[in-house]
Amino acid sequence: MSKKKVLVTGGAGFIGGNFVQYMVSKYPDYDIYNLDLLTYAGDLTKHRDNETMENYHFIKADIANRDTIIPLFEKVKFDYVVHFAAESHVDRSITDPGVFVQTNVLGTQVLLDASKHVGVTKFVHVSTDEVYGELDFDPTTFFTEETPLQPNSPYSASKAASDLLVRAYHETYNLPINITRCSNNYGPYHFPEKLIPLTISRVLNDEKVPVYGDGKNIRDWLHVIDHCSAIDLVLHEGLNGEVYNVGGHNERTNLEVVKTIISTLGKSEDLIEFVKDRLGHDKRYAIDPAKLEQLGWKPTYTFETGIAQTIQWYLDNKEWWEQIISGDYQNYFENQYKLN
Ligand code: NAD
């Protein structure tokens, strides 16, 4: 039997990178192709170990470039596509929405066309709970797969648009797809513009930590490895055309998250600086993962064990995040937060 060929788009980013590592070691009999444009959010240093593995391959390409993508699919004939590549940061989508439409919407459409053209066995579209909009603070309410899509940021709107295209390719062309909608991830190799790695890296450097508004917005956190196992399960067992929500019931306010990191690192809460709130800041996200649990998924980390593992990883891998925050990132940070 020939080896399965798995295309992972965005495999130089945070979640895609962890997924590539997970797949390369779990499935030595699969060929894993990491396709990535290497934007500011992508880096290949995380794949140094994979580069020595025979079943790991890297392709530098733009998912929105049809002239590259279609011939690539014709040549390699992928069995599975797991699609992570995206512009992923809400704050950047507020200042520059255009590239979000280009990559997240048009890029997804090119991949769908290519997948239909060669007849892939499964296309898993990795999406986000942010497409559902926001919940109020009633702790008994959750996003289910039936919750209407009401995205509030240009980022989540571009993801919702791509979700609808993926759905339409199933309804119209019978393309075998699944959509996963996961809550906020954290873990190793998370780019330090996002709340958890931003807080860890700044606290370790005894620098002020910006917190939007009153810090009471709630996110539902999931360790990235638990997201990877969910996608693996959906890829192999998901029913064609179905959406699966992914989350581990770990709701925390942003302020609670920041305070947990500060106390774990033995630093002072004086490092917290409240800053002007994000425009259109969603109040609360919370996932009901019952449908995925019925498929057989269970997370392995609680928030407490996951955050402890993640903080330790940032302590052990300073070199990785220090080279990121020393470059263009500084300009981005200063423009974004304008700290006192
Ligand atoms: P990330 O920003 O860390 O990585 C995105 C990757 O995509 C980068 O390596 C980048 O170089 C690549 N990329 C960007 N534009 C590209 C293009 N035109 N062609 C090819 N590659 C391109 O993002 P992430 O946090 O790892 O998120 C991955 C996916 O998971 C996204 O689709 C996101 O919407 C979704 N998601 C993220 C979260 C989260 O908490 N981070 C939660 C749920 C879903």
Image (cartoon, grey):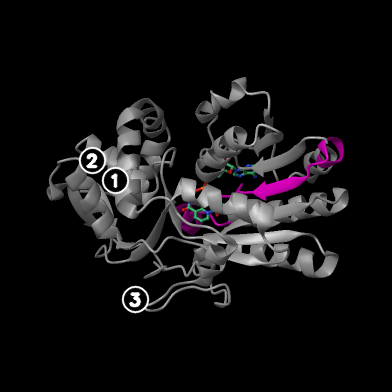
The verdict on residue 279 being magenta is: no
Q: Nearer the viewer, mark 1 or mark 3?
A: 3
On the question of residue 256 being in view, the answer is: yes
Q: CA distance from mark 2 to mark 1?
A: 6 Å
Secondary structure category for the residue under label 2: helix
Q: Which secondary structure, mark 3?
A: loop
Of residues 253 and 225, the one drawn nearer to the viewer in this rendering: 225
Q: What residue sits right under mark 2 in the picture? A: 203
Q: Which residues are magenta?
A: 73-97
Determine crowd level at label 1: few under 14, some 14-19, many 20+ residues with C-alpha closer than 10 A.
many
Query: What residue appears at the point 47 percent right and 59 percent down from the top-left corner?
Result: 94
User: In the image, is residue 290 above or below residue 42?
Assistant: below
**Label number found at residue 199:** 1
Q: Is residue 208 left or right of residue 45?
A: left
Q: Which mark is residue 139?
A: 3
* Horizontal arrangement in the rendering, residue 335 relative to residue 89 (left or right): left
Residue type beneath disc 2: Val
Residue at mark 3: C-beta within 8 A of ligand 1: no
Q: Specify the quadrant of the image occupied by residue 69.
A: top right
Question: Nearer the observer, disc 3 or disc 2?
Answer: 3
* Depth order, front residue of 32/126: 32
